[in-house]
Amino acid sequence: MNAVAATPPAVQQPWWRQLGPYNMFTGIVLGIGGYLLGALVIGATLSKGIEAQIGTDQNDMELVLGMLFGLLGFLIGMGFLNYPFARLRGFAPSLREKEEHGIWRYFTLCTDHKVVGIQYLWGVLFFFLIAGLNAMFIRTELLYPTEHFWSADRYINLVGLHGTMMMMMTTSLVLGPFGNYFLPIMIGSRRMAFPRLEALSFWLLPAAEVILLASVGARGFPTGWTGYADLSVQAKLGMDCYLLSFALIGVSMALVGFNMLATVYTMRAPGMSWGRLPIFVWGVIATAILQLLAAPVLVASMALVLMDRVVGTTFFMPFNGGSPYLYENLFWFFGHPEVYILALPGFGIVLEVISVFARKPVWGYRLAVAGLMGVAFLSFFVWQHHLFVSGINPDLRPFYMLTTELISIPTALVFLNAMGTLWRGKITYTVPMLFALAFFFNFFIGGASGIFNSDAPSDVTLHGSFFTMAHFHYTIMGGLVFAFFAGLYYWFPKMFGIHLNELLGKIQFWLFFVFFNLTFFPLFAVGMLGQPRRVSTYDPTLQTLNDWVTACAYVLGFSFLVFVINVIYSCFFERRVAERNPWGARSLEWQLATPIPVYNFDKVPVITATPYEYGVPNAPAVANLNPTREQVVAAGG
Amino acid sequence: MSAARPEHDGRGVNWREKLRPSPEMRRVLLIWLVLSVIATPLVVVVLGPHLPPGAASDVAHGQQQDNTVMTAIVTPIIIALLVYFIYVLVTFRRRPGDTADGRPIRGDVSVMGAWIGVTLVIVIFLAAWGAYELFPGETGAGGGQGPTPLALATPADASSALPVQVIGQQWAWTFRYPTYGGVETTELVLPVNRQVRFTVTSIDVIHSFWADKLGVKADAVPNTSNVAFAKPVKLESSTIRCAELCGLWHGHMYAPLHVVSSARFSAWIAEERKRSAPIQHYLPPYASKYAPEPTYRAE
């Protein structure tokens, strides 16, 4: 009960606050209660008289209301309503909550951005593990050209779960852990602009994932991660879980984007001009803009499908004026920016890492920023390249072909930056550097295969085939996941005060890199030879290739096990304690003590230089961490 | 490091000096040039004829040429990046005992300009080439174009084409020949060397009609007639698959495709008409598209 001692004794908590500690467990209890209330009382009452739903086990009304009330109960139990209600009742604003509660703060609404970052890290890794296991199950089925291991509906559910979970998880794979943890520190701030929204954006993630996993108990959903209507309208109850959870992720994404932008805009330390922001922060800014603008479209389209399913509207049904094309447009208008939401923070990380380990400034800082922003801007103008053969306005195909190919120009600027940074550098092959370099190899193959996909005549063969599947795995897994591991190995010593084992890290890297390529490169050929995505049966002549891919995929999966072993070994057995700045990096987070104190900075720092002055004679330190009042004022503070 | 003026001071640049590549860069360019000159023709000649979707129809052949051109463009780019990265990673690695930082070389306007220029030229060429391939109607006509295909993207002999309606449903394909009394079959048989006009539709959810050997893919969307063209030129059999996830048995949504001689096609279609004459009366009337009524979930 140190926590009680730490709070000022004058504050007498109201009696109802003393009933529960407001943590994950009260959240779960109230969540279950909310579900029962929503489903068995409200939902059951409202669905009376709707012929399509009573008398079947397909009562969407009950499930949806149950989930919504369950979510509400969970958020109340987590304590998300305490602050607004306290303010309504006239209590003074308190900025921070539960920041000094030891291990328990990781299971509560905590407004410390570093706690949220670590919550995100383990949260996404846990779901990454489940989704990765699904991938192993899918590949196991594809050992044989006909169904052997899973029935057709299990298989289709596995495909949907794998895709949806990965897509949800990867939206916060970088922004969640590293964005929340390091962005405020990198700009010299003590917190995010909206710490409670930050906590909310995290706690929506486990809620969404639990709802998504609940679809397994509601007979799954057959639509894959794209959820095309009108298959989604026709699908069984599990579909509602997909729609609700994806909508929640959309809300979470929009909140994250909003929060990140507000933080960078308002919370920069004196002297942190836009031109001194680390590239990673620019990557986060570009991503945040996309999230803010694209995610609401996702939430809206999910809500419309829910309306079609629950209350019988026909937005996406091909009769009564509805159209499946409407869903395709809405979904991909979100969906294409979404894939750049996945890619852009990765660009930021790898440029950061390459600069540190080549011991050189980022070659063209403004060019890199222009590249990131250019990708973000163009990504809103390309979505119909997912619909080249759908028959949706064929005259626009050349336009979307052009815009899609134009994206390679800003992307190439990021490549040019990496190439320029490496030139005449002093390259050290640490584990994060290896991952960052592999990022460029993989992402380049992803991009080069994208040229084929972007070409409308060529896309006739490639659309919806394993080629496309290999293409986006190269960009997301080969790109984002490699960048994530680069960031994790790079920042782990700062986040946890412990070095990950270098040898195990290298073993993981080489297994991952080699078997990633051995797994996914043959899939280009598999797709070109006529195997569609998401099928459990295929042409028997393709069995050799598929078996090869499956065998390599198992080793790929094993490489993640090496990572888990590495974390356990390094944290519990080796315990090589990290010094303040093991990589000799210049950026602000490495100048702080490890572990970083709750308030990050004792005084508001004054930023005096960019973080990339490697090799510059007499370069000033990146920041004055103990400035005098005059220095703060002089820097515009 | 000994230079009095910092490297990144962009003023007073001697352009002739700037644009002359360093010995290292010259070596990279030379290796790239040699490898590209060897590899690119090799890719076109050796890999090109094996690229999908083959040459079983006019559109398939066009797409194969399209793929060959793009592979030929991509090959030197891949080689450039590989050569650059491998060279740099080997040459500029940190030597043992060296603790200094690298020289702080920063953005060079001429390099940036050249890079943007080159990527822009490649992109404009690719887009223009793609659009050009789309329009004569020999390459791009295999993709679904919706109910009203562009005149530019329609093959010249489209007016005399054999119309075939492709109807997707969960989880089977039906083929309807409107000019032969609307006879319905479950296998697609086409005469060789005759333009075919596929009108693809669905009676429930979105499917995608993929005749991969013919280079045809068109989404089957309910209440829409999605048109695609192909002229088969090879006598061969292959399999049609559904390329858009359409539910439980998506993986089992096959249909056989046979390209046969004109005479055999006539015989086959006459046989089919005779066989289905007794049930023809009960089939729903031919329509170019179908709008399904709401189907509530079974069970």
Image (tube, coloured by chain):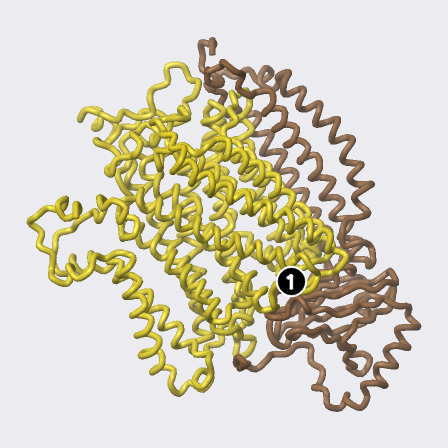
Of the pair A248 and A448, the residue shown nearer to us = A248
**Considering the image in quadrants, where does the C terminus of chain A appear?**
top left
Q: Is residue B225 above or below residue A55?
A: above
Left or right: A551 with respect to B36?
left
**Looking at the image, can residue A382 be seen?**
yes
Give the letter of the chain under mark 1. Answer: A
Quadrant in the rendering for residue A241: bottom left
Chain in brown on the image: B
Q: Is residue A523 above or below residue A505?
A: below
Labels in figure, total: 1
Q: At 42% from the left edge and 67% from the top edge, which residue is drawn?
A: A303
Quadrant in the rendering for residue A534: bottom right
**Looking at the image, can residue A366 be seen?**
no
Left or right: A330 with respect to A249?
right
Q: Amino acid at mark 1?
A: Val
Within 10 Å of disc 1 (Cα), the crowding (few <14, some 14-19, many 20+) is: many
Of the pair A490 and B71, the residue shown nearer to us = A490
Residue A114: percent from left, percent from top: 31, 42
Secondary element at image label 1: loop
Q: Where does label 1 land, which residue? A: A535
| Extreme residue in the front direction | A573
Q: At 59% from the left edge and 64% from the top edge, which residue is drawn?
A: A155
Of the pair A280 and A572, the residue shown nearer to us = A572
